[in-house]
Image (cartoon, grey):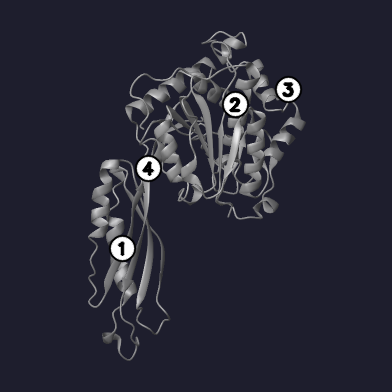
């Protein structure tokens, strides 16, 4: 699997410049039509793909090479070099998550991504990066190499056009998001406390490119049932079936689901028993929990902890918790979405919001500061063989990110210490 221990941390201070990316190119705001072709070209040029994106197959080939590759470390190295080319001071840390810091004495905004994917090493041989009919397919291109590409495009555009953001852009790219950010979450939390706002470059929702303003929280539990082995033919009454008890437990756990409240309980794996003629002495199940409201966390954890055996001679052990809170539509998050919708309107893009069942590092950052998720590529097929990005949508999404970085900071409480 493309996971590893390391993170890319970049701080970029842009040159002083004019009033905004559209004005700098001579286009009035609220122009009423699609993204100006000159802006798309400027973004592409800033990303070293030259000024003619549309109608140039060789430029797509360069993009394919950028998004290709099989190992997280290789992708991280490419992104690190591109960020350095865009004017950033970059660092690669291995096993030192808590030491990631923001620039001292300066306000900052965080661009958040990850280089790991769910695909095993070697997948690139079976599913090579391919461009066909405007769609780029390949493992991880949608989740989330496309979003990393947009970061590079947007930051390079600010540098190319001489524009200064009101808060220093800080890029944090982890390598363990697909395995629940076990190591990087501490650093992400620390950064979120220091920054004014967070832009999460996870892929967008649906063909419309909706932003993710709501995500379910999630957690993982392990339920272990201990019984007593016995010969199933000679002495069944002397045994206590852990599998039978687990069957009762599974029914109870699934009964806790409440779709109307956005609560979903799933027993995803079950293991147990020794052979067909032995009463099963052990059984284990992994349970996934997802919920929409942080207020439901305590209730669900208590109900799972209340699981009691009904089969005589068995006992139950439970480990786990709901350790990833939901991303909720808080006032500050909604204010950031309103900012994004206005910026998209200036580019001639209709922007909507939606809810995603899966979680991201945005679930964590939203606890501490304004967070906007789903700013990455438009496409489909995350974690699936048909994964793809709509290549012609990459420049406009990079333009949107650039405009968000240039947007005035919200008034109100400063970031947490």
Q: Residues within 10 Å of mark 3 (few under 14, many from 20)?
A: some
Which residue corresponds to mark 4?
A: 216
CA distance for labels 1 and 3: 58 Å
Tag in front: 4 or 1: 1
CA distance for labels 3 and 2: 19 Å
Question: Residue 386: horizontal and vertical position, in percent?
Answer: 60, 45
Residue 34: tell me if it is visible: yes
Q: Secondary structure at mark 2?
A: helix
Q: Residues within 10 Å of mark 1 (few under 14, many from 20)?
A: some
Mark 4 or mark 2, which is nearer the start of the sequence?
2
Q: Secondary structure at mark 3?
A: loop
Tag in front: 2 or 4: 2
Q: Residue at x 40, y 76 (%)?
A: 273
Q: Secondary structure at mark 1?
A: strand
Which residue corresponds to mark 1?
A: 318
Q: Which label sits on residue 132? A: none
Which residue corresponds to mark 2?
A: 155
Mark 3 or mark 1, which is nearer the start of the sequence?
3
CA distance for labels 4 and 3: 40 Å
Which residue corresponds to mark 3?
A: 52
Callout 2–callout 4 Cβ contact below 8 Å:
no
Mark 2 or mark 3, which is nearer the start of the sequence?
3
Mark 1 or mark 2, which is nearer the start of the sequence?
2
Q: Residues within 10 Å of mark 4 (few under 14, many from 20)?
A: many
> In terms of depth relative to the viewer, which is nearer, 195 or 237?
195
Q: Residue at x 67, y 36 (%)?
A: 81
Tag in front: 3 or 2: 2
């Amino acid at each position: 699997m493309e996971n590893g221990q390391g993170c890319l941390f970049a701080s970029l201070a842009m040159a002083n410049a004019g009033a905004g990316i559209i004005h700098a190119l001579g286009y009035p705001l609220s122009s009423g039509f699609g993204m100006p072709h000159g802006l798309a070209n400027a973004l592409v040029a800033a990303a070293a793909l030259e000024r003619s994106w549309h109608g140039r197959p060789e430029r797509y080939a360069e993009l394919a090479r950028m998004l290709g590759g099989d190992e997280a470390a290789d992708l991280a190295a490419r992104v690190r070099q591109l960020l350095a080319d865009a004017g950033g001071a970059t660092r690669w840390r291995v096993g030192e998550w808590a030491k990631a810091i923001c620039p001292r004495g300066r306000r900052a905004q965080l661009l958040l991504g990850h280089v790991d994917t769910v695909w095993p090493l070697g997948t690139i041989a079976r599913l090579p990066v391919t461009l066909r009919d405007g769609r780029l397919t390949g493992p991880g291109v949608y989740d989330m190499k496309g979003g990393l590409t947009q970061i590079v495009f947007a930051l390079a555009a600010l540098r190319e056009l001489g524009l200064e953001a009101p808060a220093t852009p800080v890029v944090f790219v982890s390598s363990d998001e697909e395995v629940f950010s076990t190591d990087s979450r501490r650093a992400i939390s620390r950064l979120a406390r220091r920054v004014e706002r967070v832009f999460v470059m996870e892929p967008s929702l649906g063909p419309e490119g909706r932003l993710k303003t709501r995500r379910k929280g999630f957690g993982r539990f392990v339920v272990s049932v201990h019984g007593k082995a016995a010969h199933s033919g000679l002495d069944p009454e002397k045994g206590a079936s852990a599998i039978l008890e687990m069957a009762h437990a599974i029914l109870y756990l699934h009964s806790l689901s409440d779709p109307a409240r956005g609560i979903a309980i799933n027993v995803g794996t079950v293991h147990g028993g020794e052979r067909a003629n032995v009463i099963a002495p052990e059984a284990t199940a992994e349970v996934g929990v997802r919920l929409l409201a942080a207020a439901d966390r305590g209730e669900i954890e208590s109900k799972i902890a209340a699981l009691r055996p009904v089969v005589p001679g068995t006992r139950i052990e439970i480990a786990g918790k709901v350790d990833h809170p939901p991303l909720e539509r808080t006032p500050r998050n909604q204010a950031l979405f309103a900012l994004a919708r206005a910026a998209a309107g200036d580019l001639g893009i209709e922007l909507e919001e939606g809810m995603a069942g899966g979680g991201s590092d945005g679930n964590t950052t939203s606890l501490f500061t304004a967070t906007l998720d789903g700013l990455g590529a438009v496409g489909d097929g995350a974690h699936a063989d048909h994964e793809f990005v709509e290549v012609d949508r990459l420049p406009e999404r990079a333009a949107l990110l650039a405009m968000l970085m240039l947007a005035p900071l919200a008034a109100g409480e400063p970031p947490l210490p």
